[in-house]
Image: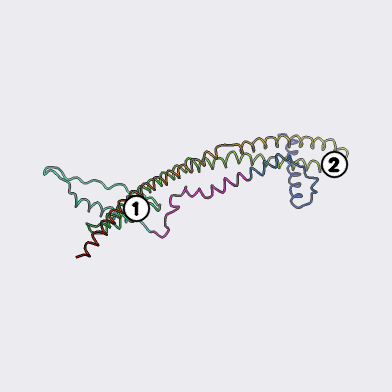
Amino acid sequence: MDWTKNWSTITKGFNTGVQATRERLGQVEADEITELPQEYKDLEARVDQLRNAHIGLHKVANVYNTEAYDYPVHIQESLADFGSTLGASFSSLAAQFPAAKSPTSPTSTQPPPPKTQPHKTLPHALSRASAASASLLPPPSRLADALNQYSAGWAAVADARVEHDQVVRQRFLQPWQTTLNTTIAVAMKARQAVKASRLELDAAKQALKTSTPAKQEHARLQVENAEDDLVQKTEVAITLMKTVLDNPEPIKNLNELIKAQAEYFARATEALQSAQGEIEELSVQAEGEYRKSREH
């Protein structure tokens, strides 16, 4: 082990820490702090703005990672409720359309479908609630027919919602987060390296001022090495920050987000307009019969 090198590293780290503390406490004059290039400072500000823009949108759009973001909190649904509702619906359909069986055909019992956790979204909840309400009304019932149309419309919206969220997660949230965790994070790390190098340089300058004549040559060499290190790290950071600012991926990701949203709303509009047309026809029929019954 090279104890001399290790001791030099420890000493530099200590001096850098002291320099940072003195600056934080306002014990260092402004002209004693090495000025970084204006280009570097301008890029720093722009990258900070870009990072904040990424974080701000991600904080809100991240809701798509949770399926129940629009699910009413006061609704208490259970698998047993869904099972009884669906069972009643199937029994009703079976009574209306009995299956023709051969006298010799064996009676078979189909195993129940596996229980799956229902989707927790508002479209799914509306579809289930309207279907359940329709099953409570004895046939024939135009209101039951209308509720079933409403349920079917929202079921189509619910399918579109699930697909929309999957696309948003895969094509926007994941790459958007990757940009935050990679290119922007790498640039931020390079900036930290610049800050540490600048503190090391200023600490070396302070050491040179207070060094004894016998140690001045060594202290001067430390300053020169620190200057070279700062120049090199600043150049690297500038390159990385420019790369972040020129990166076209965020715009591509944003395009995928709005494309998924536009497709979802288009599918939802088509499904609901179709259901609305059917319900409007039922409404006209029901109103006509009602008026006719009042004429007699």
Lateral position of residue 130 relative to residue 258, left or right: left
Lateral position of residue 225 relative to residue 50, left or right: right
**Mark 1, residues whose alpha carbon is within 10 Å: few (<14), some, or many (≥20)?**
many
List x then y, in percent, for residue 211: 85, 41
Give the vertical position of 18 relative to 3 (above or below).
Answer: below
Q: Is residue 54 magenta?
A: yes
Q: Is residue 175 magenta?
A: no
Residue at x-position 68% and y-position 40%: 193
Tell us which disc is closer to us: 2 or 1.
Answer: 1
List x then y, in percent, for residue 233: 70, 36
| Location of the N terminus (image quadrant) | top right
List x then y, in percent, for residue 271: 35, 47
Depth check, front residue: 281 or 114: 281
Residue corresponding to mark 1 = 127
Looking at this view, name the residue that lies furthest to the right: 213
Looking at this view, name the residue that lies furthest to the front: 295
Q: Which mark is residue 213?
A: none
How far, Cα to Cα, is label 2 from label 1?
Answer: 80 Å
Tell me which corner region of the image, top left, top right, bottom left or bottom right, holds residue 228: top right
Per the rendered image, the range of residues in magenta is 49-75
The amino acid sitting under disc 1 is Ser
Residue corresponding to mark 2 = 211
Secondary structure type for disc 1? helix
Lateral position of residue 276 relative to residue 213, left or right: left
Depth check, front residue: 286 or 220: 286
List x then y, in percent, for residue 90: 24, 51
Residue at x-position 58% and y-position 39%: 182
Looking at this view, name the residue that lies furthest to the left: 103
| Location of the C terminus (image quadrant) | bottom left
Lateral position of residue 128 relative to residue 111, left or right: right
Residue at x-position 31% and y-position 47%: 114
Badge count: 2
